[in-house]
Image (cartoon, rainbow, N blue to C red):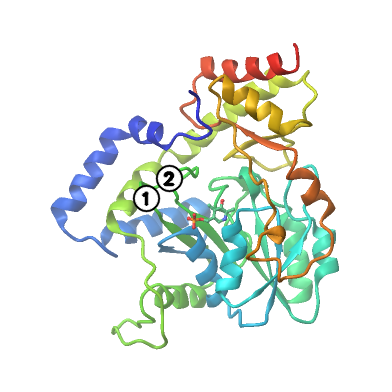
Amino acid sequence: MIPCSYPKAQYLSHKEEIDLAIQRVLAEGNLVLGENVQAFEKEFSDFIGTQHTVSVASGTDALCLALKALGINSGDEIIVPSHTATATVAAIVLAGGIPVFVDVEPEFFTLDPVSVENAITGKTRGIVAVHLYGQPADVESLKNIAQENDLKLIEDCAQAPGAKYKNFRVGSIGDVGCFSFYPTKNLGALGDGGAITTSNSEVAEQLKKLRQYGWDENRISQFAGYNSRLDEIQAAVLRVKLNYLDRDNAKRIAVANQYAEQLSSLPIALPIQRTECSHVYHLYVIEVDRRNALANHLKSKGVLAGIHYPVPAHLMPAFTVHSTSTLAQTERVVGRVLSLPVYPELGRADQLKVANHLKEFFGE
Ligand SMILES: *Cc1c(COP(=O)(O)O)cnc(C)c1O
């Protein structure tokens, strides 16, 4: 069986260091907001290229708290792709905002800047750009649009830690970058976790209050805050794995290159990389006719391909109240996308097996 993602293999490949890091936390006895969280936040800021990182309990919380820290109020419109993990959209609603769905660029699956401009109204306050599948969105255009219209730019980096837009890591370009450390992500903890990166000190200070009861430094609540903290064990594990992130992303890219070589003659659309950007292949997503038949064929051969995502957010019961224009690309791609297995530990023999089962399906 070849799974679509395989967090256990990640643990096993760094087992000694991870086990040691966990043992140290347990021996130390400080379990919440201690030295590992502090060190991880510093190391992650250095890695991404921002002044601050504020860790929280999940990627959803990272987005929700970031929107609150940026001053999003109820009734504010936030532009967002519908073709994304539903958490992106849920966070906007939880923060009190109104999601305004916009279409994606057909070749990159990320926010289409022209559609974004058309969606701006007097109530628009922000844009959430999702670096979907590990590929940076067109943040240069989006940043220009945000600046011209006095909007906040929020980067959803859950699928793309380490990816670069030109010379900048994603998460260092917008007002804030929001990350998830869910186990299957490129930088995965051994449970839930998340973080916000920013170079705005006021936003960072507000986030530190928001994540812990609204407390100031004297533990006096200045407002009703949340409890959304990364714990010490997860921070210690993430510190180990952050050291390997670029190397593990390079392994994902090598798998992608192998697929591209093997599958080039088949009647499928392979991922296209944006020029001057890196793609860290959280997912290797192809577009194909007869998608479900291909997925079933692969499954019968023990290859578990995924579908990210079969139903766009604007057609889910949670979000249908938020009216939208037709999203032609979004509604086209959801029936055609298929995610092939990709993770750093996926060996060459298994890569070839996946490719051969695809060739078999197309009679090659
Ligand atoms: C995983 C993910 C999230 C949510 O992160 P959680 O840690 O699961 O809350 C948000 N946005 C995108 C694009 C994701 O892939």
Instruction: Indicate the position of residue 142 as horizontal and vertical percent values.
Output: 74, 61
Q: Which residue is mark 2?
A: 183
Kindly state the secondary structure of the residue where label 2 is placed.
loop
In-image side of 332 versus 242 (left or right): right
Tell me what residue is drawn at x 60 percent, y 38 percent: 283
- Labels 2 and 1 touching (C-beta < 8 A): yes
Residue at the location (55% across, 31% down)?
A: 342
Residue 118 appears at what percent x and percent y?
Answer: 86, 67
What secondary structure is found at the residue carrying circle 1? loop
Going from N to C along the chain, the mark reached first, 2 or 1, is: 2
Q: Is residue 168 above or below residue 303?
A: below
Residue closest to the eye, 268 or 320: 320
Q: Which residue is mark 1?
A: 191
Q: Residue at x 46, y 40 (%)?
A: 245
Residue 21 in percent (x, y) is at 25, 45
Which residue is depicted at the point 60% across and 20% down?
A: 354
Mark 2 closeness class: few <14, some 14–19, many ≥20 residues within 10 Å: some
Answer above or below: position of 282 versus 110: above
> From where the camera sits, is residue 8 visible?
yes
Kind of residue at disc 2: Pro
Camera-side residue of 95 and 162: 95
In the image, 295 versus 67, the foreground residue is: 295
Where residue 307 appears, as percent x and y from the top left, is 63, 40
- Left or right of 338? Residue 67 is left
Please name the amino acid that badge 1 sits on: Gly
Q: Residue lying farthest left?
A: 27
Residue 135, located in which quarter of the rendered image? top right
Front one among 61 and 220: 61
Image: 226 above or below 49 = below
220 horizontally vs 115: left or right: left
Q: CA distance from mark 2 to mark 1?
A: 6 Å
* Mark 1 sits near ligand 1, with its Cβ under 8 Å away: no
